[in-house]
Image (tube, rainbow, N blue to C red):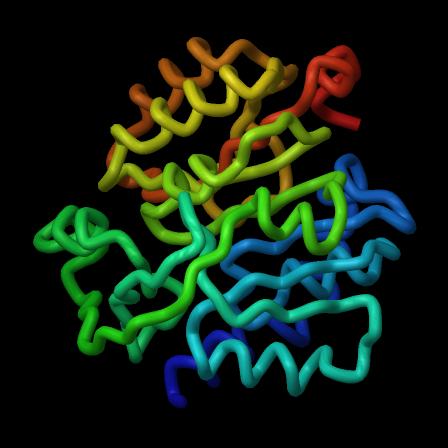
Amino acid sequence: MSGLRRSLEAYYGDPAREAAMDAFYARFVRPGDLVFDVGAHVGDRLGSFRRLGARVVAVEPQPLCVRALRALYGDDDQVAVVSAACGAREDRVRLHVNSANPTVSTASPHFVRAAAGAGGWADETWDAEIEVATTTLDRLIAAHGVPAFVKIDVEGFEDAVLAGLSRPLPALSFEFTTIARELAPRCLDRLTGLGFTGFSVALGDEMGLALPDWLPAAEVAAYLRALPHEANSGDVYCVSEERSRRPATP
């Protein structure tokens, strides 16, 4: 519970951060849109999507985080909380839980191995395992509709999530880390095959794109390969051909 409490304290109650987040996501999310928040954790992005007027499907496998999401948003009929991991198929998967820092709990054993001894990750411990159900993006689309935007933040399991998507969407984001560099190129290849054409990057928790325009996947892959280890993490933003004709920055 102490780890969850730290997350709630870190992600809620900062009006300046919330305003920056809303301004950033407004380029992807409009009132009335449907958004999937995959790896919702305690829902700070969910909160931004709701402030922007979107209907949100929040997907989260950790029981304590699901309890927090339902406590925060259970009275909001525009939020659906799905207690599951998202993956390549409907099944069950073993979730490696970091009790002290639940935001880096993961369904990827490779991610846990990659973190061992890595700079900036030495204090992280995955001290429990639980089995959770998995759903897919295709299944979520069948149940809830086609989203305008999908946020994927699942600590090294992003390629499995994208394997469960078989159609292009207007826009989505997926997290990358410098301890698992091989993952982002696989995700970019998958998304290019699905029809996404424009890509950019946000570093860390910055609410802004590091690249001035939408670029081809190969150029973004090269940019990510060149990042120093200390960059640690960030998100790749991906848009359809129609949206890639618009400027990446407002």
Where is 167 relative to 21, above or below? above
Q: Residue at x 32, y 46 (%)?
A: 156
Where is residue 109 shown, x and y percent of the image? Answer: 19, 54
Nearer to the camera, 9 or 50: 50
Q: Residue furthest left?
A: 117
Q: Residue furthest right?
A: 31
Specify whether residue 20 is in view.
no
Q: Residue at x 72, y 29 (%)?
A: 170
Where is 71 relative to 11, above or below? below
Nearer to the camera, 54 or 214: 54
Tally of marks: 0
Q: Residue at x 43, y 36 (%)?
A: 163
Q: Is residue 142 left or right of residue 120?
A: right
Nearer to the camera, 15 or 78: 78
Where is residue 95 shown, x and y percent of the image? Answer: 29, 66
Residue 209 found in image quarter:
top right
Q: Residue at x 68, y 60 (%)?
A: 57
Residue 4 found in image quarter:
bottom left
- Quadrant containing the N terminus is bottom left
Where is residue 110 shown, x and y percent of the image? Answer: 18, 47
Where is residue 187 shown, x and y percent of the image? Answer: 41, 29
- Quadrant containing the C terminus is top right
Specify whether residue 231 is in view.
yes
Q: Is residue 242 left or right of residue 151?
A: right
